[in-house]
């Protein structure tokens, strides 16, 4: 581990810790909320996770000289949205998963009805958090409203939920790489693009700077998801102790399924470079942390 | 039917028509959205309904001299939220209803996964619509952000979702009138209070005017829900052709179950008067339509 990676590890760990603290306080304790609804929301919200999206909000704000404090409500919001999407995705009617990150999924602990409601409440509460960056930290209302609108676009029918719907519909058989790219873009890239732009908005980014953050996020998100596809297969092969045969892979349609492992790895590298270039070409004053995060993500093993 | 009721019927019908048109256009056609997700959202959104909440947004804005146009995005938003809550409430894990307003429920047509996603997308899109009142009609960002925040509060863990969770948890047995009042307040009144305040915000209401609208909405919402309880029982009795015996009613814990029919009817009248008084005492310049809506709701038979 060289110096740069050591530094970015420290950066990520310390920022993740701040995010954890903010998440723990995100639902005001003085609010009268049915106890098991609050518990169910907290259970999934505090279940670990790398907090990558909030860290991207913070890093984008910092790259433009914005403060951590004023970006934190939006960082919290994006993790609430990410968490709700996992709770709903795990439901029996969707992916029907019993475990996530080694813990029972929300509906296995609190029942399906409560898991649906906890997801609904987490999503709704995200928009409350966004508004706090104006109310508590004086980010101009105009910018905060733009964040709120973009959250609705990137997380909604045209964004993440659209990607999830396409994924569900595609289970009967995705036959084109374009379909898979659509799903990856909307299920994964959209929230990453949102995170970066939202951090930018908080810090008063110009249109050109927002555009650079979008380009960075779009390429990085796709690279991240293809990397995930690759790690999935490597993980399965490690578990099986032998290479997964292509007919066994047909269940899980991934990038390597379409273009092979080697080309997929190449694509990850290309997209990462493309992402970094967008930032380097931009007039964002301090893009170093974002560039390091891009490299960090491509070297992860889970 | 006297002249006043004829007028309020016309008012409601014409406003409902405007709302229908706005709802039909709420999800931009140029957005790339998976076809069955769009269909599933539209199916429930355009399934009829009295559009009472949007009409209250419009009437509140008009009572303060606000324009219909500038209030319409928020009116649309509240109907999206109301619709999502119905789609999720009808799910097998929740109320498990096959029909709503004589049509198959969303999950019976599109499957559970798509119904969950359609609900999620409708909720998310509501916050997009709210933002449009600034973007398209120039309502000041500060006010629109307040609307967005209040929507998150009144529709979220402390509001509607909290009420729904309490209702679910209470199915094992609500033993106190206070518990039922909590559920009614949050499942029903909260969105009505929001609708009125949001209309007020659009028109630039003062704190005192917002407070009067809240009081009106809170009392009216509770009256509306108790009236619903009463109509439910009358409806059941009409269907059965005989009075529902009290032990048969135990399944459905309602206001009449706790305090009897007569006292419930009295309570509806009291709350309606209380609601109207709050407006009459206020300095809202043109409260007439809101007062008429209150009377109209209490005379409805469904």
Image (tube, coloured by chain):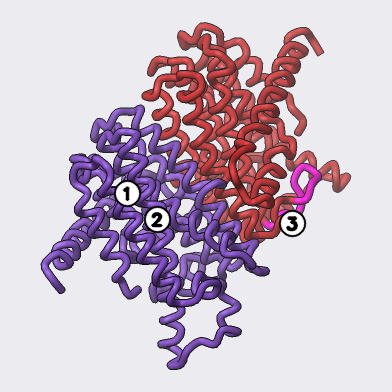
Chain colours: A red, B purple
Q: Is residue A227 visible?
A: yes
Check disc 3: other Cα within 10 Å, few if <14, some if 14-19, many if 20+. Answer: some
Residue A65's spot in the image, x, y percent? 52, 9
Under circle 1, the secondary element is helix
**Please, which chain is the residue tagged with disc 1 on?**
B
Residue B130's spot in the image, x, y percent? 36, 40
- Mark 2 or 1, nearer chain start: 2
Under circle 3, the secondary element is helix
Q: Are marks 2 and 1 in contact (CB under 8 Å)?
A: yes
- In the rendered structure, which segment of residues is drawn in magenta? A96-104
Check disc 2: other Cα within 10 Å, few if <14, some if 14-19, many if 20+. Answer: many
Residue nearer the viewer, A159 or B277: B277
Under circle 2, the secondary element is helix
Q: Quadrant of residue B93?
A: bottom right
User: Disc 3 and disc 1: Cα gap in Å?
Assistant: 46 Å
Same subunit, tags 2 and 1? yes
Q: Is residue B52 magenta?
A: no
**Please, which chain is the residue tagged with disc 2 on?**
B
* Residue at image point 54% right, 56% down: B182
Which residue bears the numbered disc 3? A108
Residue B4's spot in the image, x, y percent? 14, 64
Q: Are marks 3 and 2 in contact (CB under 8 Å)?
A: no
Which residue bears the numbered disc 2? B219
User: Disc 2 and disc 1: Cα gap in Å?
Assistant: 9 Å
Residue nearer the viewer, A68 or A199: A68
* Residue at image point 66% right, 40% down: A256
The answer to whether B182 is drawn above or below residue B201 in the figure is below
Residue nearer the viewer, A140 or A194: A140
For this orientation, the residue located farthest to the right is: A241
Which residue bears the numbered disc 1? B278
């Amino acid at each position: 581990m060289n110096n740069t990676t050591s530094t970015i590890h420290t950066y990520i760990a310390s920022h993740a810790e701040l995010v954890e603290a903010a998440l723990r306080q995100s639902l005001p304790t003085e609010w009268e909320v049915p106890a098991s609804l609050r518990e169910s929301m907290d259970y999934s919200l505090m279940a670990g996770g790398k907090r990558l999206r909030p860290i991207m909000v913070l890093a984008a704000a910092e790259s433009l000289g914005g403060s951590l404090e004023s970006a934190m409500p939006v960082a919290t919001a994006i993790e609430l949205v990410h968490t709700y999407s996992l709770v709903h995705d795990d439901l029996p009617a969707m992916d029907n998963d019993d475990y996530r990150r080694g813990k029972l999924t929300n509906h296995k602990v609190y029942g399906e009805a409560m898991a649906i409601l906890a997801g609904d409440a987490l999503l709704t509460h995200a928009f409350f958090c966004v508004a706090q960056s104006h109310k508590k930290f004086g980010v101009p209302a105009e910018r905060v409203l733009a964040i709120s609108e973009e959250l609705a676009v990137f997380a909604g029918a045209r964004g993440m939920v659209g990607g999830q719907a396409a994924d569900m519909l595609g289970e009967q058989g995705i036959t084109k790489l374009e379909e898979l790219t659509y799903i990856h873009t909307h299920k994964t890239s959209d929230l990453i693009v949102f995170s970066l732009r939202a951090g930018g908005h908080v810090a008063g980014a110009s249109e050109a700077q927002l555009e650079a953050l979008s380009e960075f996020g779009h390429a990085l998100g796709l690279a991240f998801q293809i990397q995930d596809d690759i790690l999935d297969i490597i993980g399965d092969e490690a578990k099986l102790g032998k290479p997964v045969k292509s007919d066994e892979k047909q269940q899980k349609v991934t990038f390597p399924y379409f273009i092979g492992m080697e080309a997929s790895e190449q694509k990850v590298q290309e997209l990462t470079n493309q992402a970094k270039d967008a930032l380097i070409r931009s007039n964002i004053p301090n893009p170093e942390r974002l560039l390091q995060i891009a490299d960090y993500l491509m070297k992860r093993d889970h």
